[in-house]
Amino acid sequence: MTSRFDAGVTAPPAADLSGRTAMVTGGGSGIGRAVARALAAAGADVHVVDVDAEAAKAVAEDTGGRPHAVDLADAGALEQLPSEVDILVNNAGLQHVAPLEAFPPERFAQIQKVMVTAPFLLLRRTLPHMYAQGWGRVVNVSSVHGLRASPYKAAYVAAKHALEGLSKVTALEGAAYGVTSNCVNPGYVRTPLVEGQIADQAEAHGIPEERVVREVMLERSAIKRLIEPEEVAGLAVWLCGPHTGYLTGASLPVDGGWTAH
C-alpha cells in the first residue's frame, strides 16, 4: 500500500507558531523529526532533543533549531535542557519485545525512565514558564498501545498507559493557566523503531517482511498501511493551533480504525 505522504515531505503548517519555542524529544528521527520539521515550518523555534548527537544536529540544521544530545534515562542530564518552552512534545521512546517471565528488569526500568519519568521531569521544568505567560501546549506522542495492549510488550504498554494518565493530570492542572495537554495515539508508524520490529518478526516467524506488516501489524487496522510520520506531525501541530484551546485531556487515535473494534 502506498501513501501520498512520502518520506521526507514536511506536513503543511496547521498553525502560525511564529515567536513560539518548542522542544521535541526523540527529535532526531521518525515521528520526532517529522514533528520538529512541521513545527519549524509553522514558525516555531525548535529545540531538538535526542540521544544521538549527530541525528539531533542534522535535524536542528534542517529546521534552523538547536540540538541537544541528552540521554533521557539520565534524570540529571535533563537539567541542561531549556525551561522556557511554550510547546513540549514528549515523543522519545524505545521498545523491547519479550514475554513477561523473560523480560529483563533493567530494560523495563530503562523504558519507564525514558517514556514516563523524563516527560514528568520535563513538565516540572517547563510548566512554570507556560503558566506564567498564560499559554502552553503539551503534546504527548502516545500510541494505540496507550489505549490497548499487545502481548510481549509489557514495558512499552505500561509506559504508554502511564503517559496517558500523566497527560490527563497535566490537562486538569494546566487548564486554569491556558495550558492544554493531549495525547496523539498512532498505530504502527513507518519509523526506524517499527522497521526494526518488522525485520525481527520476519525472522522469528520465517515469513517475508511484507507479510509481517499485512498479517501481524495491520491485522487489527481497517486501513491496511503504515501511517507516515508526517501524518502524526500534522496532528501534533494542529493541537498547537488557534482552534484547539478547548481540547485538552484527550487521546486522539490515528490508528486506521484499530480502536474502532
Image (tube, rainbow, N blue to C red):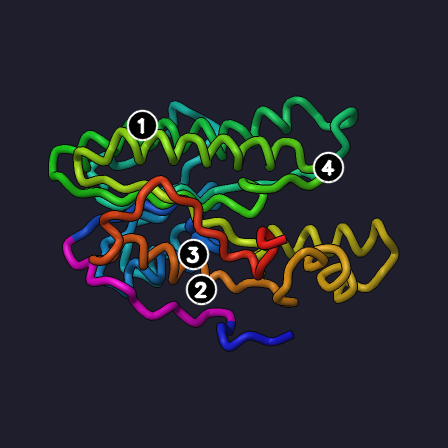
Q: Mark 3 Cα within 10 Å, few/some/many (few <14, many 20+)?
A: many
Badge number at residue 33: 3
- Which stretch is magenta? 7-19
Alpha carbon of mark 4 to alpha carbon of mark 1: how far? Answer: 34 Å
Q: Earlier in the sequence, mark 3 or mark 2?
A: 3
Alpha carbon of mark 3 to alpha carbon of mark 1: how far? Answer: 22 Å
Alpha carbon of mark 3 to alpha carbon of mark 2: how far? Answer: 9 Å
Was residue 251 drawn as part of the magenta stretch in this picture? no
Q: What element carries label 2?
A: helix
Q: Which of marks 4 and 2 is nearer the N terminus?
A: 4
The residue singled out by tag 1 in the image is 79
**In this rendering, position of residue 222 left or right of residue 91:** right
Three-letter code for the amino acid on which mark 3 is drawn: Arg
The residue singled out by tag 4 in the image is 152
Q: Earlier in the sequence, mark 1 or mark 2?
A: 1
**In this rendering, position of residue 69 left or right of residue 244:** right
For the question of whether residue 49 can be seen, the reply is no
Residue 115, position as x, y percentages in the image: 49, 34
Q: Residue at x 50, y 27 (%)?
A: 113
The residue singled out by tag 2 in the image is 230
Q: Nearer the viewer, mark 4 or mark 1?
A: 4
Q: Which of marks 3 and 2 is in front?
A: 2
Q: Mark 4 Cα within 10 Å, few/some/many (few <14, many 20+)?
A: some
Q: Earlier in the sequence, mark 4 or mark 1?
A: 1
Residue 1, position as x, y percentages in the image: 65, 74
